[in-house]
Image (spheres, helix red, strand yellow):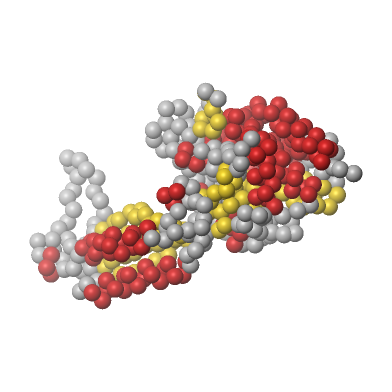
Amino acid sequence: MDKRPAQGALEDALVAGIAAREGEIVELAQALIRIPSVNPPGEHYRDCAELIGERLRRRGFEIAYERALGAPGDSDRYPRWNVIARREGGRPGPCVHFNGHIDVVIAGAGWTRDPFAASIEDGRLWGRGASDMKGGLAAAIVAVEALCDLGGPLPGALEVSGTGDEESGGFGGVAWLAERGWFSRPRVDHVIIPEPLNVDRVCIGHRGVWWGEIETRGRIAHGSMPFLGDSAIRHMAAVLAAFESQVYPALERAPTAMPVEPPGARTPTLNINSVHGGQPDVEPGANAALPSALVADSCRLVFDRRLLIEEDLDEVKASMRAMLDGLAQSRPGFAYALRDLFEVRPSMTERDRPVVRATSAAVRRVLGREAAIICSPGTYDQKHIDRIGALRDCIAYGPGILDLAHQPDEYVEIADMTGSAQVMALAALALLTDGS
């Protein structure tokens, strides 16, 4: 018997059902945005987790609240709460998991509307986290609810998680859970993360990152006699000159097979986050004290090096150290320390993975055009699902425009939330019923 007509009827019902629930998607996204779960410091995680958990509990999901005890940032004042909801199907099959982070960055300056009012205007939902990624999380939740309402029991299982700390590395969220088996087989088979990467793009991975600190050292002396000291700031200037003459030109010559968007990120990048040298800054003003006349004996530079899939992190580190060692040999008095602050290796799943194929087909069905297969210039929680959970069948797909993330007047198109919910629901249906 040909199952395609029956499957097609299910798909039609799913698409129509989600279109009728657009108001629910908007209302849920508004409720999430109105909880100011700002990280740092990590506020109101439990409130967000309970909003998700209690909603899905009423739909027959088993709910687990997990606090990431001992994770960076976790404290009794700012506990790192996560929620995982699971609903078993009527017979054995794979598990499709939708993961969204509940934390948002600070609102910052420059808003023309209340960042936590979740206002609606011109077909858009505005607010901090609307795009990154409470709009996507709301779309995923309603997509799962629509799947549950199809009628007959589906095989396998559906999971939804709301996790914290993605904006600060994910160590109190997905990483902590992955270390405890929440994102590994046999519990989970496929993961979709509704990050804001545009509604017609399927993201199969991201570049890596190495944050580090270089400290140059000098010798303190009176500012009127700098020849008796050794300026750490001048030594740091030599590091910056070496960046310009050696590092940046080499980065521009490194091509990649990663389909990173935007195209400018298809080479490795190095950003200088900050430089701090000498005495602490003084506040300007009529009564401000002048700094002392001293030669700087220390200067620190924090950098952000982004890596492509072709690069080896250990080799990148060795290259940086070799450059600094070269300065130590050629520049009298040059002494330095190189410290690791944070690192993530690049991650990219294969284009023929079931979750990639299913989501791409759903984009074609809902939007009427081929999905673009991309990689993200920055990292997101796929890094932990891949490296810790050893689960390759993971992508990012969701509504929202990446360029709006962390910006003032952040918004998400309401139509894109609805369309992405339809895509996610169709992808999950295919993964469950195909038994992939």
At which x and y percent is residue 364?
65, 39
Tell me which corner region of the image, top left, top right, bottom left or bottom right, holds residue 55. top right
Identity of the residue drawn at 20% across and 74% down:
332
Q: Nearer the viewer, residue 399 or 289?
A: 399
Task: Give the quarter of the image for residue 53.
Answer: top right
- Residue pushed farthest bottom? 329
> Residue 420 or 48: which is nearer the viewer?
420
- Side of 67 relative to 107 (left or right): right
Number of numbered discs: 0
Q: What is the quadrant of the N terminus in the image?
A: top right
Q: Mark yes or no: residue 334 visible.
A: yes
Q: Which residue is drawn at 72% across and 44% down?
A: 428
Percent coordinates x, y for residue 370 in the rendering: 61, 41
The residue lying furthest to the right in this view is 1
Looking at the image, which is closer to me, 169 or 206?
206
Residue 341, image x, y percentages: 43, 61
Residue that extends furthest to the left in the rendered view of this protein: 224
Judge by depth and name the residue closer to the eye, 55 or 423: 423
Q: Can residue 50 be seen in this view?
A: no
What x and y, as percent, mark residue 79?
Answer: 57, 49
Give the left or right position of residue 158, taking residue 295 as reference: right
What residue is rendered at 75% in x and 59% in y? 186
Eyeballing the image, is 198 above or below 379?
A: above
Q: What residue is rendered at 75% in x and 43% in y?
A: 429
